Image (cartoon, rainbow, N blue to C red):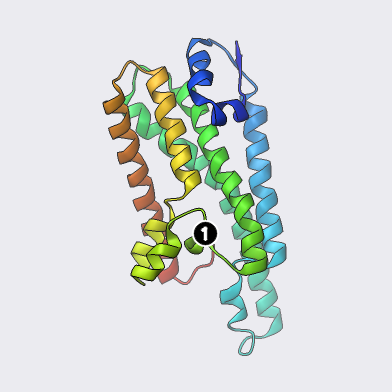
Amino acid sequence: MIEIRLFKGIINPGVYFEEFRNGEHIKGFFTKLMLVLGLSIIIALISSYAGIGTEQIHWYMDTTKNEKLEMAKVLFGIGHLVSSLLFPLVYMFFFTVMYWIFFHDIPFKKMFFVQLFSVSLLLIEKYLLYPLQLFLGIGRESSPFGLGVLTQLLTDHSFMLHFISYFSIFFIWAAMVQLISLIKLSQRSVKYCLTIVVCMNLLYILCGTVFRIIIEELRIII
């Protein structure tokens, strides 16, 4: 039996997933999953209370009744909570299904467990970015952890800004954890694992970018 240890799996994935491969029974997954979901909801509640992401609502303060503005804020808060709850689950299911297509030698259940480590890193990034959003008004597109700022100097194209903003230290770190876990848990070559990880992460980024562009076009705040 092996216990889910998020910190060890993130900091020393090579050693941890070597042990994980030999473990027949996994302990503590549900507890850690609830922890991740709980932390994701907490950051959503704090962000909604602080008004982060409601800039578009405030643009209409002079032309819209206060009642409608307050209702818009409530709906924004609910939408933010729902998206924060769904994000870890969607991320985990997306990569589990995509990777399992190419790695049938890894049990589906174990593949799902592995994604918890990667999504935890993205959650850590959200917590570190929060103070910058609150005090400096810096969004993900301008995050100091990624390439968004550099991209803004080169282009103002909305698609490129969203696409490149995904490439952060934590996103790459999460992809590396995925790569190491696949190498340790499967019988495939390093080259094969690297190719699949790069392609699946690019597909995830592409889907996320298209989704955000559609949301912007529909003028929906998430």
Q: Nearer the viewer, residue 64 or 146?
A: 146
- In the image, is 90 to the left or to the right of 33? left
Give the number of callouts: 1
> Residue 160's quadrant in the figure?
bottom left
Q: Residue at x 52, y 14 (%)?
A: 19
Q: Secondary structure at mark 1?
A: loop
> Residue 35's quadrant in the figure?
top right
Q: Position of residue 172 (x, y in %)?
A: 44, 42
Q: Quadrant of the C terminus?
A: bottom right
Q: Give the residue at mark 1.
A: 143
Q: Residue at x 43, y 34 (%)?
A: 176
Q: Position of residue 140 (x, y in %)?
A: 51, 60
The image shows residue 49, relative to residue 11, as above or below, that is below
Q: Residue at x 59, y 51 (%)?
A: 126
Q: Position of residue 1 (x, y in %)?
A: 60, 10
Q: Nearer the viewer, residue 123 or 153?
A: 153
Q: Is residue 91 visible?
A: yes
Q: Is residue 157 visible?
A: no
Q: Amino acid at mark 1?
A: Ser
